[in-house]
Image (cartoon, helix red, strand yellow):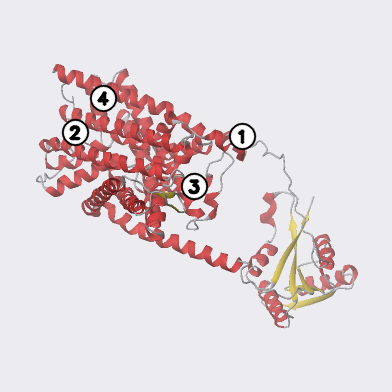
Amino acid sequence: MSSDEKPINVFDDFTEHSPKTSIQTWLIGRPLATKDAAEQTIGKIVGLAVFSSDAMSSVAYGPQELMLILAAAGAGAVHFALPIVFAIVGLLMILTFSYEQTIHAYPGGGGAYIVARDNLGELPAQVAGAALLTDYILTVAVSISSGVAQLVSAYPILHDYRVWIAIVMILLIMTINLRGVKESGITFAIPTYFFLLMMFATAIIGFIRFIGGNLGTVINPPHMEISILQPISLFLILKAFANGTTSITGVEAISNGITAFKEPRSSNAGKTLVWMALIMSTLLLSITFLSIRIGAVPAEGETVISQLFRTIYNGRGLLYILSISSTTVILLMAANTAFADFPRLGALQAADGFLPRQLTFRGSRLVFSSGIVALAGLASLLVIIFQASVTKLIPLYAIGVFLSFTISQTGMAHRWWKSGHLKPDEERVEAGSIVKYNKGWTFKMVVNSLGAACTFMVMIIFGVTKFQDGAWLIIILIPVLVILFFSIHSHYKHVASRLSLDNRQIKKHIKRNRVIMPISGVHSGTLAALEFASTLSEDVTIVHVSIDPVETSKVRAKWETWGDGYRLVVLNSPYRLFLEPLLEYIDKIALIQLPNELITIVVPQFIPKHWWTNFLHMRTAESLRKTLLHRKNIVITEVPYQVE
């Protein structure tokens, strides 16, 4: 090492410090160390509950929303529901095959966002991100509102309190999710499997009674809320199909959350996805068929699923109560899928610089706490605006998710095309995965292209048929969000370029420090700040803005005694302004500032003993600091003085 070089000393230190017990630890559990992350992963059984509750629970309201549209043409038109559901199940199978491929191609998770980013570019990726984030917010609002609707069906007296009940449920699920993936997964597994048990029991008993010829029809069905009948038309059928496709939203959730699964992640996630698709298909077809056979009437007053339960179980007995309770709980828990995926997707976009960086930080329980809280707040706002009405929220739903489906399918089709144009021993490293030659690339590309075409058509159908009902809001919102994302990204890029050390010119070292210390009076805090200021430079100027001549004379007198010879500049302010004269003085000093000179503003900061006494004191130092922060070549230093 030459004599000109200075040794670089690097010390690694490890702290054993752990957060103290507080209300937060009591509410969401003790903090987890980073090394515990591997232990927080989940298996297929719990994963099905965490990531599939949204998709599976939609069988409780999807058929109703489909039948509600058909009922506009009269009770006879409801029979079209079953063929429409068969078409929906076919679409579900295509999506399942596609996302199963996505899971294995992108084991790091991220779903449509990562697929679009790696295969289609930044703009499609941000469109997919905006669509999915919007959909997750709506998933919470719709699921919670639907769960509350089931509760109100059983207990009509609660109708006027449905909005508050929904908000309380959102906050409860938020709290559970803040406790961590593993703990929230175990919590949600019990109600999820209880729901599946009751739904399959209902379907089996219903089919047994149907075959035996004693299924019967709904007793005292609710009044059909239709004033004018419409003719059966292609538009009506397509609108019903669009409403019914809300039953398959949530299919992408598992591909977004692969990292939450135990190893082998892709295998476990893929199997969970297939299980989910089979369960959904069976229940969708069964519930729709039985609901048509009993003559269920789609209405806000009582849900179709409630009518099905009380018909099959001959009234509102114990089995009805258990079934409606399981449905209510699973609909409430369905919001958990969004709480599992929204923070992960937000963290991915934030890591790429398109959302605030705070979303990338994990909380004390190794979950993305900021994303969880943000989701709860936005969903609660929607519930309040739309008064927890599923019918009002549904038109906003599904456009976003089908847009993300389309982008994801298109991205995967392009990936298979790239795979097919590689040599067998060649590979292409991308940000989210490694592309290798795949001998079945042609078939897979065709399937994904078909899926993209189907989901694109569904999105268009949904947008056209639901445009006047509120879908226009989402059509406008997604581009606005994309513009916002790119604005955030532009800001981060600008900041990064300004902070970069590349091509940085070596500036002259600072050789002189000019210190200015504004004071309002002479007291112990002033002298403590002066003592600090004197360590920075010999050139220290004390500035007092004179608002009251009497007070100024007291300051002069005290400074002669306690000022230790440092110069005092008094700025007269006849209009009783404080900041403006001081800033004007600082500007004058800045004009004569030398290239190698630094101006430091030392601000005495009075700190009262109790926080609640802050409002009794003027926060002059804080106002000055905020104003001066935007001035170049000026350093602001606060010197706190605590009063015991």
> Do residues under tags 3 and 1 come within 8 Å of each other at their CB atoms?
no
Q: Closer to us: mark 1 or mark 2? A: 1
Q: Secondary structure at mark 2?
A: loop
Q: Earlier in the sequence, mark 3 or mark 2?
A: 2
Q: Earlier in the sequence, mark 1 or mark 4?
A: 1
Q: Earlier in the sequence, mark 4 or mark 3?
A: 4
Q: Which residue is mark 4?
A: 309
Q: Which residue is at a point 16% across and 31% down the rendered structure image?
A: 292
Q: Which residue is mark 1?
A: 30
The answer, for residue 183, to whether it is visible in the render is yes
The relative height of residue 628 versus residue 300 in the rendered view (above or below) is below
Q: Earlier in the sequence, mark 2 or mark 4?
A: 2
Q: Closer to us: mark 3 or mark 2? A: 3
The answer, for residue 67, to whether it is visible in the render is no
User: Mark 3: which amino acid?
Assistant: Gly
* Label 2 crowd (10 A; few <14 / some 14-19 / many >=20): many
For the residues labelled 2 and 4, the Cα–Cα distance comes to 13 Å
Q: Which mark is residue 371?
A: 3
Q: Which mark is residue 520?
A: none
Residue 101 percent coordinates (x, y): 35, 42
User: Mark 2: which amino acid?
Assistant: Val
